Amino acid sequence: MATSDQVREQFDVVVIGGGAAGLMCGLVAGQRGRRVLIADHANKVGKKILMSGGGRCNFTNLHCRPDNFLSANPHFMKSALSRYTPFDFIAMVERHGIPYHEKTLGQLFCDRSSRDILQMLVQECRQAGVTIRTRHALTVDQLGPPHHLQGPDGGIECDSLVIATGGLSIPRMGASGFGLDLAASLGLPVQPTRAGLVPITLPGRKLRQLAELSGVAVQAAVRAGSVAFREALLFTHRGLSGPAVLQASSYWQPGEAMHIDLFPDGDLAAYLREQRALRPKQSLRNALSVFLSKRVAAEWIRSGLPDGPLDSLSEPQLARIVERCQNWQVWPDGTEGYSTAEVTLGGVDTSALSSKTMECRQHPGLYFIGEVIDVTGHLGGHNFQWAWASGHAAGEAA
């Protein structure tokens, strides 16, 4: 612990955490003329930015709305999202001449590399006079303001302290529970955390049945509870993944089933009756292969569906085929956990924070932004947009 008579380095704003939210907050505060320090315990800032989107950084989503987020308070994120939109971030990207493209569902990716986005943010910070330090773990000695912090080189004092340390996901990228632990130590409410946007695991018997399908992807609608997502589903050596499963995993609760429709574009019974009229001697395996792929169709036949010509199918058999393909139920025994989860569900309860500034109601000059808050986006650039919006809100106020 530093003593009060030691010389402390002075900043207006200290941001702990050099990820997406922290960098955005720092550059906005710096542009206001604030003396800003961004400190990160890792060896470089923006590690999750670099790995995101397969190295292309899905940096926002054109259709980002409050209903793309999970939170105990579904209204909290509305203010920040409305005041810093995807088009505001796109304007910065275009100003830096970064080429990008839209994939499906409004997702925007860099043409070249995620590094373009990270370099843009760091350059904006440098131009705003922001100090960035890596391998620079800070501890909080005393909250103020002024807040007293302790770093590797001695004491630091600041008027505004911003916690941008993220969640528990992908610890190999430097994730830590610093922000959650700090909030709990201050008596702030914290919503229970768990892995989100994460592959599910299946029990051994089911895995053995699906072992030959590892690496195969099909289109599907995956439902957990009352929420369904239609995207790709991927069979893995541990269970199921792919965008549709990752999305549904955030809504899945242990002990519940996931319901999977492998013919998400229509009425399978009507399709099979149509095929039966056009090609009565076509096998069920070939009819199913059109949308299931040959390997999945073969597995579904092997696991009990009749493998005769379509004109031999009875109505009860047709109903069983439809049930197996359009209401396939799987009972996960868990998820792959934080090691592969893209986000952390839960976090600092929004009731403790101002929705306009992200400032802690009980502790003036203390802010929480980004993933450490109980706001979790869907897959597809929404979590980045929350990082930009919450970071911008705090940067304008800190």
Image (cartoon, grey):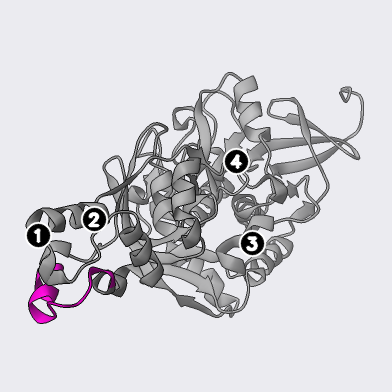
The residue that label 1 is drawn on is: 314
User: What amino acid does circle 4 point to?
Assistant: Gly
Q: Nearer the viewer, mark 4 or mark 1?
A: 1
Q: Quadrant of the C terminus?
A: top right
The residue that label 3 is drawn on is: 51
Which of the 4 quarters of the picture holds residue 229? bottom left
In the image, the segment drawn in magenta is 271-285
Sequence-earlier tag: 4 or 3: 3
Which of the 4 quarters of the picture holds residue 310? bottom left
- The stretch drawn in magenta includes residue 284: yes
**Rendered image: mark on residue 326:** 2
Residue found 65% across the figure and 27% down from its top: 181
Sequence-earlier tag: 1 or 2: 1
Alpha-carbon distance for marks 3 and 2?
35 Å
Marks 4 & 3, CB-CB < 8 Å contact = no
Is 104 placed left or right of 139 in the picture? left
**Rendered image: mark on residue 167:** 4
The answer to whether residue 11 of the structure is visible from this angle is: yes
> Please, which residue is most extreme toward the top here?
187
- The stretch drawn in magenta includes residue 33: no
Sequence-earlier tag: 3 or 2: 3
Residue found 49% across the figure and 53% down from its top: 383
Is 124 placed left or right of 229 in the picture? right
Marks 3 & 1, CB-CB < 8 Å contact = no
Alpha-carbon distance for marks 1 and 2?
18 Å
